[in-house]
Amino acid sequence: MDRTGIAPRLRHAEHVMGTVVSFDVPAWAGGPDGALGAAVRWLHRVDATFSPFREDSDVSRHGRGALALADCAPELAEVLAACAAVTEASGGYFTVTPGGGLDPSGYVKGWAIERAAAMLTAAGSAGHSVNGGGDVRCAGARGDGQPWRVGIADPLRPGVLALVVTGRDFAVATSGNAERGSHVIDPHTGRPAAGLASITVTGPDLGLADAYATAALAMGPDGCGWVAARCAEDGYQALAILPDGSMRHTPGFTARLP
Amino acid sequence: MRRVILAVTGTVAGLVALLSFKSHSPAIPAVTTSGTGMSSSPSSGGPQGSAGPAGQGFATGAVGAVPAGERAVTGQVAGTAYGPVQIQLLMRSSTIVKVTILKQPSSTIHDLQLGQFAFPRLISETLTAQSARIDAVSGASYTSQGYIASLQSALDTRT
């Protein structure tokens, strides 16, 4: 710890899980045996276990009936149980079989980042952020002691921020159609979800925020109302950006604004 | 100086993003070209003449002498789906006063239209990201490739 004021920081970008995970951590967390390295190794283990794109992952093998759940990594049962709860809460708009085969990615990425951030906290970090391809978990305060500031990308104007949210311990997940095309399918119609350019969900847990954002995007214009009705009591809020650039948000979302 | 380099990186990266995302935009004003593939100008006689970046010194073609009190910062050549792109910024203090396209995709009129449309907006976009003082960016998932052009990658490389 630098006793003169701001402690040295370390930034790290790790290519894993089909995206890049960006870390902002105290500098002491670096090094081969540091907390950052442990968090990175965890993410690669999640990738190997949960990737639907790897033939030999537990998810792929379990999905095609080649591996019993009891023989999979123990985290798979935990993840599938959490996913089932979101599927029920969302009336089926969130599903672990979005393309037919088993693919819990809509929860796993946020869940894995949540765990990585918790590992850093457990190792003694009083402030860090972990951004997994646009899903962000902030913990404690940033290096200068101030709340974290997370920019929400404008889905209609690449490279531009639509707004900024702030806070100390919170998660921010955004689902949208900006970069990968219409990748969220409405499971009730089998067609790409329309109606929202993007939806951002904030809350205490990034896994749930990620899954809620996926479900709410598939719901379209009703997505914000669903978050307000079913998720707000647990601390989740949402902001949706519509194709015309207008915004809708849950009543409590304004507490996140600077 | 670090900020300036970041601005160049961000602008070039942003351009790549725009070229990737705006390829089907129907509302881009038409332009005529001089045929060299390097310089272009807004077409005369149409309402699109007003679409230029008034007051921002947007220019194409070879850069001239650098005025006193300003400095030129040249970005790296960025490969895009439409061909190589390279820009040069003229900076006064920490403000971008002019953007010059050193190299841009020139194979079709459509590419030049994209260039005309993209650069003026990128100036404000780069400054917007700088002034927001953010720590991270939340948005629709990016791939490993998309990360390179993302605002988050610019944040990760700052000091």
Image (cartoon, rainbow, N blue to C red):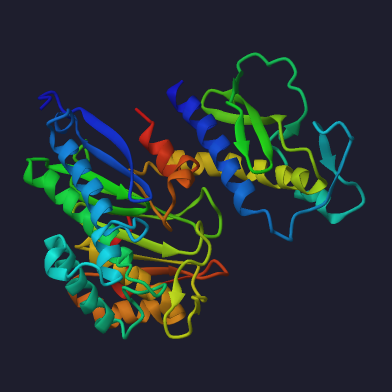
Residue B147: image quadrant is top left
Image position of B63 (left or right of A34): right
Residue in view at x 59 percent, y 31 percent: B96
Residue B72: image quadrant is top right
Residue in view at x 82 percent, y 33 percent: B37
**Total residue callouts:** 0
Q: Nearer the viewer, residue B99 or A74?
A: A74
Image position of A125 (left or right of A246): left
Regarding residue A5, the answer to whether it shows in the image is yes
Residue in view at x 33 percent, y 76 percent: A94
- Against A60, residue B145 (above or below) is above
Outermost residue to the right: B45
Q: Nearer the viewer, residue A234 or B19?
A: B19
Q: Position of residue B123 (x, y in %)?
A: 59, 39
Q: Position of residue B19 (x, y in %)?
A: 64, 47
Regarding residue A254, the answer to whether it shows in the image is no
Which part of the image, by quadrant, shows the C terminus of chain B?
A: top left
- Against A190, residue B141 (above or below) is above
Q: Position of residue B126 (x, y in %)?
A: 52, 40
Q: Nearer the viewer, residue A90 or B97?
A: A90
Q: Position of residue A108 (x, y in %)?
A: 26, 61
Image position of A63 (left or right of B63): left
- Against A94, residue A46 (above or below) is above
- Against A189, residue A119 (above or below) is above
